[in-house]
Amino acid sequence: MKIYDLSENIAFSDEKPIKRHFLNAKGFHAALICLKKGIELSPHPEGYAVLLTVLKGKGEFTDSNGVVSLEKNQSIYIKKDEIRGIKANSDLVILGIQDRHKKEC
């Protein structure tokens, strides 16, 4: 068993989101994403599905259905190849669990 202290990975930048990967397991990948108030990750498609859970703060999350506001202990699931974006309304800390299943031959 390995225990992860996520507080060790919290870091903010005045210019960009900070993403700290802490687990790369078979089938999924986990990272902590930190955005200082006002920082935005523009909507873009990604080649993997992701579950984003707010650990601290509030933010606006964009997917193909539009924009939703989430705060501490709320999550959003975004499918593979679907657009995603984030805007921090306050200092925002997010746990991201990426579905990284490998294609079978």
Image (cartoon, rainbow, N blue to C red):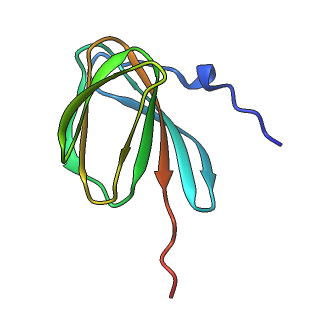
Q: Residue at x 44, y 43 (%)?
A: 51
Q: Residue at x 26, y 14 (%)?
A: 89
Q: Residue at x 60, y 52 (%)?
A: 24
Q: Quadrant of residue 71?
A: top left
Q: Quadrant of residue 88?
A: top left
Q: Front-most of 87 and 75?
A: 75
| x and y, in percent, of residue 48 in the image | 38, 58
Q: Quadrant of residue 14?
A: top left
Q: Front-most of 11 and 53?
A: 53
Q: Is residue 97 above or below residue 82?
A: above
| x and y, in percent, of residue 63 in the image | 23, 43
The total number of labels drawn is 0
Q: Is residue 35 left or right of residue 72?
A: left
Q: Residue at x 49, y 23 (%)?
A: 73
| x and y, in percent, of residue 32 in the image | 50, 32
Q: Residue furthest right?
A: 1
Q: Is residue 105 above or below residue 98?
A: below
Q: Is residue 13 left or right of residue 26?
A: left
Quarter in which the N terminus is drawn:
top right
